Amino acid sequence: MADLDNLTTRQREIYRFIREKIQGRGYGPTVREIGTEFKIKSPNGVMCHLKALQKKGLIHREPNMSRAIQLLEDPTAAPVTQGVPMLGRIAAGSPIEAIEQDDELSFNDWEGAPDKFALKVSGESMIDAHIQDGDFVVIHRQNQARDGQIVAVRDDEGEATLKTIFREKNRVRLEPANKTMKPIYRDKVEILGVLVGVVRKY
């Protein structure tokens, strides 16, 4: 297990800032946010710290994605339990910010699933797909999807929603499954994952 004691003071502060952002809102900070928080004027200065954290096995960064910082290991975390991590709420209406929570949605027939996470649906835009307000959707974590798949996506403003995705010439159409609602159009979106299950409590 990685040890925070092996980090410099600034690296430890940045790591904790990243962890707080991911735990608080569901995704990591941008290089600019880190620079602003720690008064680091140069993006290269921030990148040096991020590369050090990555080299020490604490974070992973996806290339060409400004917010794609993932925690690989949390030395202060409690032991992992089995189940699907409960990341928060997702809109099935107007987009809302996805907020990560320290919770877990557990299934007897689904053991530890690091490639899956759960979100609680808020709204009625997917009712014709039998996804209702208050349901839990299980998402397979991936950044690609085919047209016509129901996906959890986040746009460049950090808003998340559950919709059926279709790519048009110069934009993405996020189609609700509710005849009374209109599609949402975005220039680009970040695909968080593809729907693989729906759980409903009665």
Image (cartoon, grey):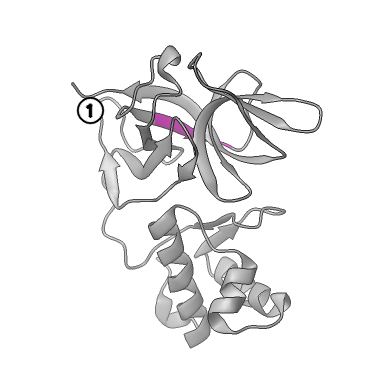
Main secondary structure of the magenta stretch: strand
Q: In which quarter of the image is residue 142?
A: top right
Q: Mark 1 points at which residue?
A: 108
**Percent position (x, y) of residue 19?**
43, 65
Quick check: 23 above or below 192? below
> In terms of depth relative to the viewer, which is nearer, 62 or 66?
66
Q: In this view, does 179 lie to the left or right of 83?
A: right
Report the front residue among 201 and 183. Answer: 183
Q: Give the range drawn in magenta.
A: 138-142
Judged from this view, the residue extending furthest toward the front is: 180
Please tell me whether residue 181 is drawn above or below residue 162 in the rendered image: above
> What type is the residue that disc 1 sits on?
Asn
44 magenta-colored: no
- Image quadrant holding the C terminus, namely top left
Q: Horizontally, is 145 left or right of 130 in the view?
A: right
Identify the image quadrant of residue 35: bottom right
